[in-house]
Image (spheres, rainbow, N blue to C red):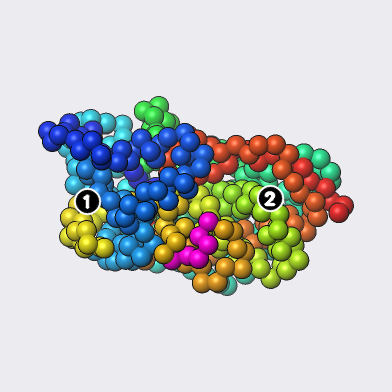
Amino acid sequence: MADDCQTEGTAPVTGDKPEDENAIDWWSILSDRDFLENPYPELRRLQALGPVHFDERNGIYFILGHKAFARVSKSSEMGRDTRNWAGGWNSDDYRQYDPVGFKLFSEFQPQMINSDGEEHKRMRKVYEPAFRAQAMTSMAPLIEQQAARLLDAMPEEGEVDFIEAFAGPLPLRVLCELFDIPESLDETIGRWSASLIRIGDILMTPDQKQEALDALSEFKDFLREQIQSREGRQEDNLMGLAIQANRDGTLNEEETLTNLVSMLVAGHETTVTLIGNGMLLLLRHPEELARLRNDSGLIRTAIEEFLRMEPGGNMILRVAREDFEVEGTVIPKGAPVIGLIGAINRDPARFERADDLDLARPANAQFTFGGGAHFCIGAPLARLEAQIAFASVLERFPHIELAGEPEWRLDRMNARGLGHLPLRVRTAA
Ligand code: HEM
């Protein structure tokens, strides 16, 4: 989600210790252009050095092993409340070093992803009914309808940018439907979402932080008005659940608004990325594409394999609530821990032929949706949307091929998604 890994949020380390010249320079590696284009060879090299690493320069623990991350992500000693990050954004030093960043993180704080224990449970419980199986069954026709509409607008034969024409607009429209927001506002919501998804990314510039603060404030004002205009209505959609929880005191106003904003941001770009990255995987593996075309029953395992191979989100954050031992390393209370999902999902100790795409891969324990108490609440919706998206596209176009070089977006460290995916499509085989 927007903030599923808040990697930014520490004041620069002034450093009174001499630096180990063999130490891994994590931020340089993780933000390097070549790494962002294709992180997997470098991640494999780092993983071979061990499953848990301490980055002394920034005080961060990096997890690259599947077994280690399974423990870290699911343990109650490892939380997600970034206020507990010793020396993080909530410290006096950080407040002085970056007042705009501090304001941004503070205003984005009151939501379920940034809370632990009972506080987290109280918030999460409000939204859970919107993602249960029954709710998903009733969402399916709407997603199918939106997918068909986007496909109808594409040429029967010709070139299209798949991100612009399909993978981009579908998740936004579905989310807005979930919130009962009219289509005329898709562009505005999309703009706010694009600013807010950057929150916490270390590549975020001061201007982008200010832009995100403005977007957050406009978004909250918009939602406040929406809530007021629905006064007296009984709705069982996501917005209705939030309004009810605010009315009965389960959520205060800030929690109501911030969770709603976050939900819209969290469900948007992540799902665009799943559909875009998945399509590129299929086109780069024509034998697997043919396999899926011949056996549509593979769609569920295919989506899990897309999530494993090209996770979209690069990092998942935890903050130690207590001292915590994992694979021989003791992580001290208050320390930030980052799971590098591209490495974890391809750990050869857990996955056979870890770098191969296998659409029928059994027991696919990928970690793209995280784990434990914070496991992505929107995963059922994202999975359903992706299943419908791929089924619809493959049915409509028996012929699909790359029409040029795909372009990865290189302006974010926490996310790996395509900016452009040029395709040549044809409705006739
Ligand atoms: C492919 C699409 C998606 C991906 C890859 C994804 C990924 C994630 C990840 C990694 C987390 C944090 C998990 C952890 O810390 O262990 C998360 C949490 C969350 N996601 Fe998603 N997400 C996706 C779609 C969605 C959708 C569609 C929604 C809602 C409409 C959503 C809403 C949330 C929320 C509210 C949380 C916080 C849950 C909590 O803290 O309890 N996500 N997601």
x, y percent for residue 74: 33, 66
- Magenta span includes 353: yes
Image side of residue 426 versus residue 310, left or right? right
x, y percent for residue 257: 41, 49
Q: Which label is found at residue 335? A: 1
How many angstroms separate mark 2 from mark 1 (CA)? 41 Å
Does any portion of residue 88 appear in the rendered image?
A: no
Does any portion of residue 33 appear in the rendered image?
A: yes
**Other residues around mark 2 within 10 Å, as few (<14) / some (14–19) / many (≥20):** some
* Marks 2, 1: nearer the viewer: 2
Q: Which label is found at residue 283? A: 2
Answer yes or no: disc 2 within 8 Å of ligand 1: no
**Other residues around mark 1 within 10 Å, as few (<14) / some (14–19) / many (≥20):** many
Above or below, comparing residue 167 to residue 143 in the picture: above
Image side of residue 54 versus residue 237, left or right? left
x, y percent for residue 11: 23, 35
Q: Please tell me which residue lies in front, 126 or 346.
A: 346
The amino acid type of the residue labelled 2 equals: Leu
Q: Please tell me which residue lies in front, 302 or 181.
A: 302
Image quarter hosting the C terminus: bottom right
Q: Residue at x 42, y 53 (%)?
A: 343
Dominant SS type (magenta): loop
Q: Residue at x 55, y 63 (%)?
A: 304
Quadrant where ligand 1 appears: bottom left
**Residue segment shown in magenta:** 350-355
Q: Residue at x 81, y 40 (%)?
A: 158
Q: Residue furthest right?
A: 428
